[in-house]
Image (spheres, grey):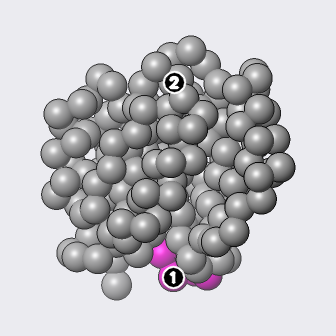
Amino acid sequence: MTVCCDLWHEACSRLSRSSHMSSENTQRCILVVDDQPGTRRLVRNLLESTGHRVVEAGDEQSAWHALRTLRSEVGLAIIDVDLMGDIRGPYLALGFKSYLDLPIILMSGHPRESLIATHHLQASVPFVQKPFTLREMMETVATVCGEGNSSSLGPVPVRH
């Protein structure tokens, strides 16, 4: 993924002056859950460059451990839809929402429309499609953080 320096600086500048970011969320960390180390590193670098604290998890178990350990410090979770293992990202996200009413952003290499059909997600779920642009990720984070806990995952998806 190529990131243009001008776009990088523009997005960082926009986020830093964005009225959507509350002081509560900028003080909290963002939990990034993805089984691909390169994706976690990319998202971490992006978010840390704009002043966010980031915690990474590569699977469901480490994600739950991080959330339980840092409970009051986590202000947002960014979760890959296609996690390897027994649980998919949307189910982990619903568990996080039930446990802590945590704002969530889902990300996937699949288009949102196909995830709505295959994972029974609502179109209103905050989502970033990989490969994402810097602008897409930063605008989604700013929007979700500005909404606080009002972001909704909708009903529990039905397992097939």
Give the residues in magenta.
Answer: 114-119
Residue most extreme to the front: 5
Q: Which residue is mark 2?
A: 25
Query: How far across and down, in percent of the image, does residue 40 sit?
Result: 42, 59
Determine whether, in the image, residue 61 is placed left or right of residue 76: left
Q: Which residue is mark 1?
A: 118
Residue drawn at the location 61% of the way across and 58% of the way down: 127
Query: How far across and down, in percent of the image, does residue 85 sit?
Result: 22, 76
Determine whether, in the image, residue 65 is placed left or right of residue 151: left
User: What label does residue 89 carry, if any?
Assistant: none
Q: For the residues carrying marks 1 and 2, which lies nearer the camera in this image?
A: 2
Q: Is residue 3 above or below residue 29?
A: below
Looking at the image, is mark 1 or mark 2 earlier in the sequence?
Answer: 2
Identify the amino acid type marked 2.
Answer: Asn
Residue 80 seen in the current view? no
Residue drawn at the location 58% of the way across and 79% of the way down: 110
Residue 34 seen in the current view? yes
